[in-house]
Image (spheres, rainbow, N blue to C red):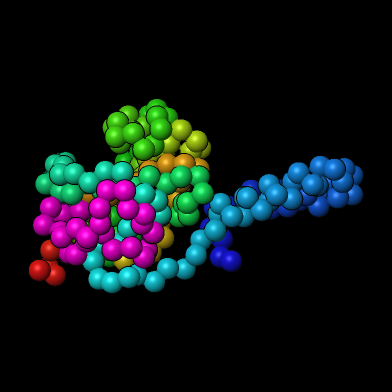
């Protein structure tokens, strides 16, 4: 099973503690064994094959918002909010090929990530992408349990459709703002998967 590289230190530490406990405190090993299993499960990073053409979901989880929005970076856009529970795959991916044009970290609160106000008040990382279809914005939002937003991007980076760019540790949310002309093919309440589920067709597909 492929694992997210951001989990290597914690997996190694938990494994070291488990091995040590086998020699010095066997009862503790009975507790650490399932903990190591959970840590490995949390940092799983499966390969994904897109289900078709169009904008891919940037995150695993359940769609909790679909609405019209207008932001300075994107102009009029579709906002799709995806809630990631603690058992979701937490690796985030690019919805389409593009170049990183904007990076902005915003400190904030730790409201439950599925709440609409989390998009405005929670700690978050904004990634603005220049694409052939127009500007696209990704927002990684830390939730109540989230302890760290990981974003490995720099301005000017060029990523391909479905390529990994970071993750959010523990329960969290990712908002994606797509061009207003995109033809959405998902619905509120639907379960989606990063790099596999198509959120909608690109404007040029019409």
Q: Which residues are magenta?
A: 178-202
Task: Give the image location of residue 91, x and y in percent.
Answer: 45, 55
- Number of numbered callouts drawn: 0
Viewer-nearest residue: 147 or 130: 147
**Residue at the right extreme of this rendering:** 24
Q: Is residue 91 above or below residue 125?
A: below
Task: Give the image location of residue 24, x and y in percent.
Answer: 89, 44
Viewer-nearest residue: 30 or 2: 30
Left or right: residue 94 compared with residue 5: left
Q: Magenta stretch: dominant SS?
A: loop
Task: Give the image location of residue 140, x and y in percent.
Answer: 36, 44
Q: Quadrant of the C terminus?
A: bottom left
Quadrant of residue 194 within the rendered picture = bottom left
Camera sees residue 127: no
Viewer-nearest residue: 136 or 116: 116
Q: Quadrant of the N terminus?
A: bottom right
Q: Residue at 25% across / 53% down in the picture?
A: 187
Viewer-nearest residue: 187 or 58: 187
């Amino acid at each position: 099973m492929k694992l997210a590289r951001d989990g290597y230190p914690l997996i190694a530490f938990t494994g070291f503690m488990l091995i040590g406990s086998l020699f010095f405190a066997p009862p503790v090993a009975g507790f650490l064994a399932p903990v190591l299993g959970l840590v490995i499960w949390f940092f799983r990073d499966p390969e994904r094959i897109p289900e078709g053409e169009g904008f891919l979901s940037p995150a695993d989880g359940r769609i909790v918002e679909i609405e019209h929005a207008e932001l300075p970076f994107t102009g009029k856009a579709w906002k799709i909010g995806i809630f990631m529970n603690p058992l979701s795959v937490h690796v985030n991916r690019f919805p389409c090929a593009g170049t990183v044009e904007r990076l902005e970290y915003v400190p904030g609160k730790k409201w439950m990530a599925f709440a609409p106000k989390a998009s405005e008040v929670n700690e978050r990382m904004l990634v603005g992408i220049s694409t052939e279809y127009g500007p696209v914005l990704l927002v990684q939002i830390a939730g109540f349990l989230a302890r760290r937003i990981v974003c490995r991007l720099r301005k000017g980076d060029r990523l391909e459709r479905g390529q990994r760019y970071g993750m959010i540790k523990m329960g969290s949310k990712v908002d994606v703002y797509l061009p207003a002309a995109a033809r959405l093919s998902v619905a509120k309440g639907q379960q989606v998967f990063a790099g596999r589920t198509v959120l909608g067709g690109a404007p040029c597909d019409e």
